[in-house]
Image (cartoon, helix red, strand yellow):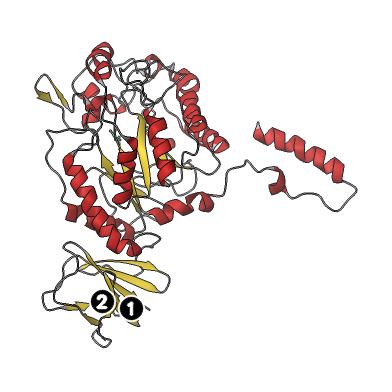
Amino acid sequence: MKKMTSLILSGILMLCFSCSQTVPKNEEITEAEPLPKDERMEWWRDAKFGMFIHWGAYAVPGGERNGEICKGGAEWIMDKLDYTIEDYEKEVVANFNPTQFDAKRWVAMAKDAGMKYIVLTSKHHDGFCLWDSKVSDYDIMEASPFKRDIVRELSDACKEAGIKFGLYHSIVDWHHPNAQAPLYPNYNAGQKDSTAFNPDFPKYYENYLKPQVKELLTNYGDVDVVWFDGDWIPDYTTEMGKDMYSMILDIQPQTIVNNRVDKGRKGMEGMDKEGNFAGDFGTPEQEIPATGIASDWESCMTMNGSWGYKPSDTNWKSSETLIENLVDIVSKGGNFLLNVGPDPQGLFPQESVERLAALGDWTDTNGEAIYGAKASPYARPDWGRYTSKDGVIYAHVFDWPKDGKLTINSDIKAKKITLVADAAQNLSYNGEKSQITLPGQAPDAYVSVVKIEL
Ligand code: GLC
């Protein structure tokens, strides 16, 4: 449509200007075209660190039904513990009333942790919508007692705090009749039967999924990231993926979209390099690629083992591990999207709050070596990682050497060396041995950063 309009427009303009030399250039008449990828990605490439929020009605059972605990992510409970749609509506969605939800508090915690963007689940595989949807009654206004538009409140709070706002949206929908594959009773999880196919899925795509995404991209101001999931089901095609991607950029020419909008992801990682598939960045899940990936990528990860709230899972990663993961990812050129699964009242689990605070303390001091930093151009040292900026290498020391001597890569030509935590303290350097003399005490309990100016 847009292309047609611009063709007609350029025809008219050609006629008007045919006698003069001032024929306008193409870009002057196609201003709603998507921005070039580099421009759209710029803030995100610098941001490095974001918060994933998996929240929905599944927080109510928290991974447990009649004493049975579901395996894996608690957001899968509907499938894992065999709820019928009716049971799920009655037992789960009708009881979702998170009266303690305070969007400003969530955003403040993300910001204080040093995160620059938030990606919230507008709809997970269970199909329940966290916003006021005119396309569906299975939403927060109609199907739950809460009746507050969660997407609106979080989007407003992000905008007020100057933090970017994104939405995760599931292609899989266990509630919509046209998205149910007929070969097994309730749901359409492709893993169960990869030949499962619902001939009405295109109707779901055209009349439900697309209008929903359109609604989200039209009514909430800028949506800075659109993060799809559920691309694996056989009913979803690459044609749909490309169509979805172009619809999104028509509405929000500045936004970025993950690779799961199309069918081009390679395992959990990046995407087809030949440009055969839509999407702007790869999404390694619960893993950090050993050497990074050539294109843009973001590792998403849970703090315990579940995306959704699951109090029975006490296998929390330590703050030290999470800080090291952030550094590891940035040293390989990626972003870190760290998940929180809020509880049914709307609160972050205490374990998450503590870890976010530790990440905040660390990024407060050492953010200079993370935000806007690039992958290390040097081989990985045994004691930690490098990140880089123009003319500067940051040495992130995971293991502070007992003898106080830090040997850096011999191809680094150091001019001036200080601690990021203490810019006033010049550290001495033996160029022949490529050895920095460190203070006896590491400035940080987890990862201390040495700034090497070249
Ligand atoms: C998965 C899971 C899911 C989670 C997600 C995060 O594919 O199905 O529950 O939302 O990935 O990346």
Asked if 192 appears above or below 27 in the picture, the reply is above
Extreme top residue here?
Answer: 86
Question: Residue 2: image x %, image y %?
Answer: 65, 34
Question: Residue 262: image x %, image y %?
Answer: 44, 36
Asked if labels 1 and 2 touch by Cβ distance under 8 angstroms, the answer is yes
Q: Which residue occupies the foreground of this view, 129 or 410? A: 129
454 relative position to 301: left or right: right
Q: Quadrant of residue 59?
A: top left
Task: Label 1: state its secondary structure.
Answer: loop
Q: Is residue 72 visible?
A: yes
**Amino acid, disc 1:** Ile
Residue corresponding to mark 1: 412
Q: Residue at x 36, y 63 (%)?
A: 375
Asked if 182 appears above or below 8 in the picture, the reply is above
**Amino acid, disc 2:** Ile
Question: Is the CB atom of the residue marked by disc 2 within 8 angstroms of ligand 1's nearest atom?
Answer: no
Task: Label 2: state its secondary structure.
Answer: loop
252 relative position to 169: left or right: right
Q: Residue at x 17, y 77 (%)?
A: 439
Quarter of the rendering occupied by the N terminus: top right
Q: Is residue 164 visible?
A: no
Count of marks, rendered view = 2
Q: Quadrant of residue 30?
A: top right
Question: Residue 73: image x %, image y %?
Answer: 21, 33
279 relative position to 9: left or right: left
| Ligand 1 sits in quadrant | top left
Residue corresponding to mark 2: 408
Q: Measure the C-alpha gap from mark 2 to mark 1.
A: 7 Å
